[in-house]
Image: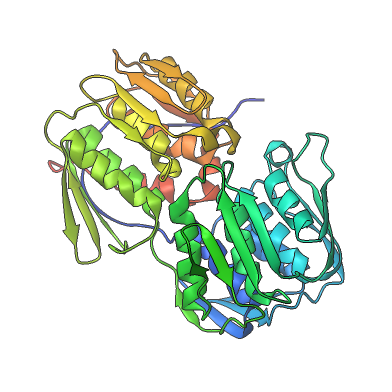
Amino acid sequence: MKRHAREISVTGPVDARVKAPSSKSVTQRALIIASLARGRSRLLDPLDSTDTETLVKALGDLGIHSRRGPEGWDVEGQGGLLPSPGAILDAGDAGTAVRFLTAMVTLGRGRFVVDGSERMRQRPIRPLVETLTALGIHARCLGEAGGCPPVEVLADGLPGGTVRLQGAKSSQYLSGLLMAAPRAAAPLCLEWSGSPVSLPYVRLTVDVMTAFGVTPVEDPPLVFRIDAPREYTAREFRIEGDYSSAAYFFAAAAITGGQVRVENLRSDSQQGDRGMLSVLEKMGCRVSPERDGWTVAGGGEIQGFDVDASEMPDAAQTLAVVALFAKGPSRLRGLGTLRVKETDRIRATAQEIRRLGAEAEEGADFLEIRPGTLRGAEIETYGDHRMAMSFSLAGLRVPGIRILDPQCVAKSFPDFWDELGRLTPPHR
């Protein structure tokens, strides 16, 4: 069967103003916390995407319902109760939803199974399941691939206690438990140990919890104490703009030597992908703060870089594509978690870079890019939204780049192709 492909139009230096879509990460955290609050919360400017749709449906299967209106989504919080006496939840390809729901269903009473797509059944969740078991919760992985979904939880409420959680695979294990913890039967102490990754996402979780009235105490670093049981306060909450999505447009300015202003971004955001701005500045771009966002301007030769991207994993592929147009090699380190995303993002990115004519060397947690003479090609996306969006940027400079299965961007940025099409060179 012929696969759909989208050809990218080559442009001159871009000159555009873009509004960043709302953050998927914040939307999902707000949905979980609003569901655990008592009463109705209204989420303003939530991201409507495949992943958030999946989470809303799963929450509905737990008996927590949402209603969409012109001013936002109303979530009918149940005060930490799960009305369903048990449920089988399908999280599809939404890894965040799988981890958050697995922690959340411990608050219920009954048998819950959290499942997902074929790819999700290959993605690790053992550290979270082992932590739940250590707390006395009956939880186990049912999947054929050891330590992966589906996960069965025989829930009878979340007890308190002190437990250590390994942080080398995903910060979402800790975030999921943190959000459920206020509704535990007694105080809970969570120690994040090992080699924790993606710490900014944990800070983001704490920020959203605080907005709903509960702040974990962190003392010493990476040891979080929650005085439970506590109640979240239902409220109106605005979802901030997404730096992961904004990164594509910042990168477009660097690649084409143009200028892009991206609005709807908080300058004090905890989002780790905000770190891409400092990388682009070191490469030679001009980065200017605005009242509600940032402007990035290229225009000169950009330089290769060597950066630890462990705290901005969703920007790593975007930076890898920018590196194709830099002078000299570039190296991205701290990428271990990318092996277990929607696809093995290190391997997939390296393969597509080679397909374009450049050189790429991959290791367990690094990717090195050496620019070469680039050529047009059909880019395989592997069902991964970030592969599609990142590699489309190369097509702004290189003729003949076609993105296969472009619809996969709906996972996090349904309007991406429309927004990319609005990047207009100054002379038009």
Query: Which residue sits at x=83%, y=49%?
Result: 140
Identify the image quadrant of residue 427: top left
Residue furthest to the bottom? 39
Residue furthest to the front? 220
Identify the image quadrant of residue 342: top right
Identify the image quadrant of residue 40: bottom right
186 is higher (above) or lower (below) than 145: below
Give 223 or 106, whichever is nearer the viewer: 223
Find residue 218 and report its horizontal and vertical position in percent. Answer: 48, 66
Give 122 or 393, whichever is nearer the viewer: 122
Query: Which residue sits at x=49%, y=19%?
Result: 351
| Number of callouts | 0
Find residue 344 and report its horizontal and vertical position in percent. Answer: 57, 30
141 is higher (above) or lower (below) than 375: below
Find residue 188 and report its horizontal and vertical position in percent. Answer: 65, 69
Query: Which residue sits at x=45%, y=43%?
Result: 314
178 is higher (above) or lower (below) than 308: below
Query: Which residue sits at x=24%, y=26%?
Result: 304
User: Which quarter of the image is occupied by the N terminus?
Assistant: top right
